[in-house]
Structure formats: C-alpha cells, structure tokens
Image (cartoon, rainbow, N blue to C red):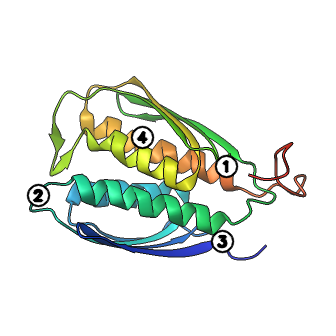
Amino acid sequence: MTERKSIVNRKTGETEISVTLNIDGSGKADIDTGIGFFDHMLNSFARHGLFDLKVKVNGDLYVDCHHTIEDTGIVLGQAIREALGDKKSIKRYGSMILPMDEALILCALDLSGRPYLVFDADFTTDRVGYFDTEMVKEFFYAVSYSAGMNLHIKKLAGANNHHVIEGMFKAFAKALDEATIPDSRITDVLSTKGTL
C-alpha cells in the first residue's frame, strides 16, 4: 500500500494554515493554533486515532476564534481526503461510543464522498478556555464537507463541557481510524457505484 500522507496549505486574509497528516502514523502530534484548548483537542484526535498530525495556524485571533477553528477544519478535511486517495480497500464506515467520565459520545461516519453533518449536542457554557463552544459544530461541519464524509456526532450524556468536547474529538478519531483501516477482502472500493 502506498503511503497515505498529505500536506495541505491554505492562506486567506484571515488565516494561514499548514496541515501535515499521516493516516498510518502512531499518534505523534505537533500542534500550534494559538488556542490552547483547540491544541489539546487536536492532540487528542491525533493520539487516539493513531494519526501523525502537524498543524500550524496563524489566525486573526484579535477578532475571535471563529476563523482559526473553522478554517483548520477545512484544511484538516482536505488533508484527510487527499491522504486517502481513491479509498481503495478501506472499510469506509467507522463508529464509536466513547465514555469520558460522565460524558458519553456517539460518533459514526461514512467516507462516502458525500458530505453531511448531523450534530446533536448542547453546551452549558459559552467557552472552554479561549475556545467558543459553538465552534465545535462549525469545526466538524468544515471537516465533514472538506473531507466528503457523512458524519454523525451525538451527546448521549454529559454535564462537563470539557469532557463532552474532548469526548467528541476522541470518538471522531476512533471512528475515522476504523473507517480508514484497509481490509484485504475489499479489492476495490466498498461501493456498488465503483467509486467513493
């Protein structure tokens, strides 16, 4: 199997972002977004998905965190899509119900090429650190649309916003890891259409 790696750079008037991703990594991360809690979430994503991930972001944080978080989602989604190439032999589907203390998070995804997000969760605070909780949905929306994946995230239980959000990033990592695993029984792509 060829190496499933990608490097994606994106520069706008609001952000400058570089993402390097190795799907077949060991969970190494080098993250600098300028938002401490976001760095923590992306580190958790890399570690629990066993992805090697390097993210460097210079964003307009003097405005707020919105552009930095959303645009990082766009670039990460592009990196996932590019690293997977034609998606030949991958399982395509992944899911996880992940506990984190009192929080319980469901994540299910399909690397179908068709973007769609279903996000079912509420938060009881506006921010965790310098991370606006309303940006959790925006991040996953950006990832799902750039990667071309059908993504469902649902909070089944949870009161601590830190635990709920971290549970989402970890559950997403585990589901994505499962979906990207090669299966020797799948000789082409897992689709009746012949393409994903």
| Residue 188 percent across, percent down from the top left | 87, 57
Q: Looking at numbered disc 3 in the image, what kind of residue is underneath it? A: Arg
The part of the image, by quadrant, that contains residue 123 is: top left
User: Which residue is drawn at the image coordinates 42% and 45% (left, top)?
Assistant: 140
Compared across the picture, whether 62 is left or right of 50 comes to left
Q: Secondary structure at mark 4?
A: helix
Instruction: For marks 4 and 1, give the CA distance.
Output: 16 Å
Q: Secondary structure at mark 1?
A: helix
Q: Residue at x 46, y 61 (%)?
A: 76
| Label 1 packing within 10 angstroms: few (<14), some (14-19), many (20+) | some
47 is higher (above) or lower (below) than 3 = above
Q: Residue at x 45, y 32 (%)?
A: 105
Residue 123 is marked as none
Provide the residue designation for mark 3. 4
Whole-percent x and y of residue 177?
61, 53
- Which residue occupies 28% across, 44% down? 135
Instruction: Please name the residue that numbered disc 2 is placed on.
Output: 63
Residue flagged by tag 2: what amino acid is it?
Val
The three-letter code of the residue at mark 1 reads Ala
In primary-sequence order, the first of circles 2 and 1 is 2
Q: Nearer the viewer, residue 113 or 163?
A: 113
The mark nearer the N terminus, 3 or 1, is 3
Lower sequence index among marks 4 and 1: 4
Question: What is the spatial separation of the Cα atoms under label 2 and label 4, in whole angstroms?
Answer: 26 Å
Label 1, on which residue?
179
Density class for disc 3 (Cα within 10 Å; few <14, some 14-19, many ≥20) is some
Residue 31, image x, y percentages = 34, 69
